[in-house]
Amino acid sequence: MKTKALVLAGLVSLAGVAASEAQTVYSVNAVGFVNVTVAPGAFQIIANPLAQSASDLNSLLPGAPVNTIIYKFDTGTGSFTSFTKRSTGFWTGINVNTTSFNPGEGFFVKNPDTVNPLVLTFTGEVLQSSGTPLQNSIPAGFSILASQVPVAGTLEAQLGFPAGVNDIVYKFVDGQYIASTRRANGSWTGVVPGDPQISVAEGFFFSNGGASKTWSRTFSVSN
């Protein structure tokens, strides 16, 4: 994916910049922020598109408004665990300090405000492959997934998703699931036909009818 296809909702700066009269030297690390907007009163599947040293909610989204609720899906039990932002300024929920929200993992968010949109800001570093592709494990059955890098595109053709026959992608749009099924001839069928379009920081439910597999991405901001 070319650099021009890297879509960040905020300014991305290159860390470690050293300037002199003769030249400017850039680090390979790209850091910045991505804003995600959730409509008033809405549920939405989102994802953290940037890497941080700590990815628990109190580290990742300390500025989220009071009563924001996040639901993370457990692939083992098929159930959700909820986390709520309290007036104390902290997130609460079972194992809140040890539950991670890493790039590649989707989750639901509920905007508690029925009047105003919710804007969540993710900050951190763009993951890049260096010799070894980025790896995102996909279990058998249901899971909630997302791109590990902040790039928008069609899921299979542009984002490199390893789609198999009868795999189903469920996007959550305006309060309902929109399903797309991968057919044996390579096409995707559904209410919205074609390879599903995934936005930056958008998550999706996925039904994997086969064995577990890996979503491998070779990505660099320099090409």
Image (cartoon, rainbow, N blue to C red):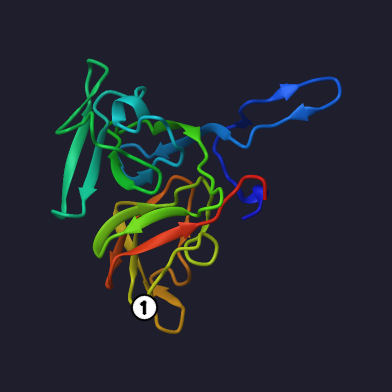
On the rendered structure, is 146 left or right of 132?
Answer: left
Q: Is residue 61 visible?
A: no
Q: Quadrant of the N terminus?
A: bottom right
Residue 53: image quadrant is top left
Q: Nearer the viewer, residue 14 or 168?
A: 14
Q: Residue furthest bottom?
A: 185
From what the image shows, is residue 11 above or below residue 187?
Answer: above
Q: Position of residue 132 (x, y in %)?
A: 51, 53
Q: Position of residue 160 (x, y in %)?
A: 50, 63
Q: Residue at x 30, y 30 (%)?
A: 57
Q: Residue at x 62, y 45 (%)?
A: 221
Query: What residue would you read off at disc 1?
Result: 165
Q: Is residue 107 visible?
A: yes
Q: Position of residue 133 (x, y in %)?
A: 50, 55
From what the image shows, is residue 179 above or below residue 115?
Answer: below
From what the image shows, is residue 160 above or below residue 51?
Answer: below
On the rendered structure, is 76 left or right of 122?
Answer: left
Element on which disc 1 rests: loop
Dot 1 amino acid type: Val
